[in-house]
Image (tube, grey):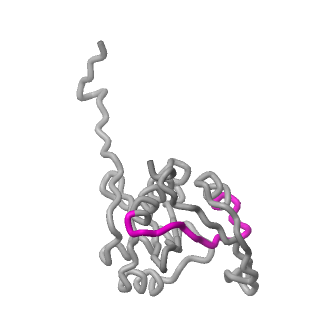
Amino acid sequence: MVEFTPATAVMTQAPVIRPLEVEDLETIVGIEQQAHAYPWKKSIHLSCIEQEYPSLVLEAEGSIIAYVVFNYLYDECHLMNITTKPSLQGRGYASQLIQTLYQHSALAGMNSVLLEVRESNHPALSFYAKEGFEKIGHRPDYYPKGVDREGAVVMRRSLSDSLLS
């Protein structure tokens, strides 16, 4: 039998995933700027909120540590941005968010999730491959990269019933 005393017990709260709200704007912009060499501008995030994209944040210990911005078009969910605080990456938070995105998308009648990712973003490409995304195309000169441009890999994942069980 293991006894827990207040000195040895650690109370941690499970992460909470909830809708992204306008009050979250400053926090997600801060995370965006920490995580990306070419971050979205605050106005882009605000526009997504104002257009009521069905986006989500993940909170742990009362603080936002990750978010996902997406939208629905016809029968497809377009994953536009998923970001975790750099100091907390690799702990499964993005996987929790994307699993919730799959569930919300399927319930909204979406058949698949589509995204674009920088061709140089190897950690993201690996993450999406592990999540079941397949490369379906390439968009040349899609992203800004200093004075140049960088191509995007287009990826898609099916939302069949077997993936959501």
Give the quadrant of residue 53.
bottom left
Residue 102 horizontal side relative to residue 52, left or right: right
The structure residue drawn at horizontal position 58% and vertical position 54%, both measured from the top left corner, is 131
Q: Position of residue 147 (x, y in %)?
A: 74, 87
> Count the marks: how many?
0
Q: Position of residue 36 (x, y in %)?
A: 59, 70
Residue 40 horizontal side relative to residue 45, left or right: right
The structure residue drawn at horizontal position 50% and vertical position 71%, both measured from the top left corner, is 32
Quadrant location of the N terminus in the rendered image: top left
State yes or no: residue 68 in magenta: no
Q: Which residues are magenta?
A: 107-124
Looking at this rendering, what residue extends furthest in the left direction? Answer: 6
State yes or no: residue 108 in magenta: yes
Give the quadrant of residue 58.
bottom left
Residue 90 horizontal side relative to residue 3, left or right: right
13 or 80, which lies in front? 80
107 or 121, which lies in front? 107
**138, above or below 98, in the image:** below
Q: Position of residue 74 (x, y in %)?
A: 48, 79
The structure residue drawn at horizontal position 36% and vertical position 53%, both measured from the top left corner, is 60
Q: Position of residue 137 (x, y in %)?
A: 72, 73
Looking at this rendering, what residue extends furthest in the top direction? Answer: 1
129 or 18, which lies in front? 129
The structure residue drawn at horizontal position 46% and vertical position 67%, both measured from the top left corner, is 68
